[in-house]
Image (tube, helix red, strand yellow):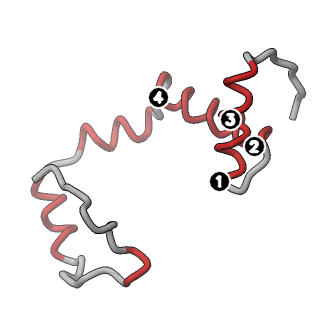
Amino acid sequence: MSAIQIELPEPVRQRAAQLAQQQSMSLDRLMVVALVEKLAAVFPDETMEERARRDTRRGFDEFMQGVPDVEPPDFDQLPSGFKTWK
């Protein structure tokens, strides 16, 4: 790894530190995650792009046939009042 130094406006640093604490990670780690996410959005993975081009709705439907139609465990439930886009 290499080290860099950046200057952040104090409100940005404070919000980033708060988020890092909420996510149980260091501020350095949060910065790395944020940068990797941004780079992935700007420079998409060509392998995934190729797989998406080859995909079909039929293939998706066949895959989904193997997924059991059961309620998720309690820890994986959506919060009450959550609205879906259906």
Q: Marks 3 and 4, how far apart in space?
A: 20 Å
Residue under label 3: 16
- The mark that comes first in sequence, 3 or 2, is 3
| Quarter occupied by residue 84 | bottom left
Task: Inspect the image, locate mark 3, and give the three-letter code of the amino acid beneath it.
Answer: Ala
Q: Name which of mark 1 and mark 3 comes first in the sequence.
A: 3
Quadrant of residue 80 within the rendered picture: bottom left
- Of residue 33 and residue 65, the one placed in the foreground of this image is 33
Using the numbered discs, state the Cα–Cα distance from disc 3 to disc 2 in whole angstroms.
11 Å
Q: Mark 2 points at which residue?
A: 29
Residue 61 rendering spot, x and y as whole percentages: 13, 63
Mark 4 and mark 1: Cα distance apart in space: 21 Å
- Nearer the viewer's eye, disc 3 or disc 2? 3
- Mark 1 to mark 3 CA distance (whole Å): 10 Å
Q: In the picture, which quadrant includes the N terminus?
A: top right
Pointer 1 with pointer 3, Cβ within 8 A: no
Residue of label 1? 23
Residue 35: percent from the left, percent from the top? 64, 30
Residue type at mark 2 is: Arg
Looking at marks 4 and 2 on the same chain, the residue that comes earlier in the sequence is marked by: 2
Residue 34 x %, y % = 62, 34
Dot 3 or dot 4: first in sequence order is 3
Name which residue lies at 22% across and 82% down.
Answer: 68
- Local packing at callout 4 (Cα closer than 10 Å; few below 14, some 14-19, many 20+) is few
> Which one is earlier in the sequence, the residue at label 4 or at label 1?
1
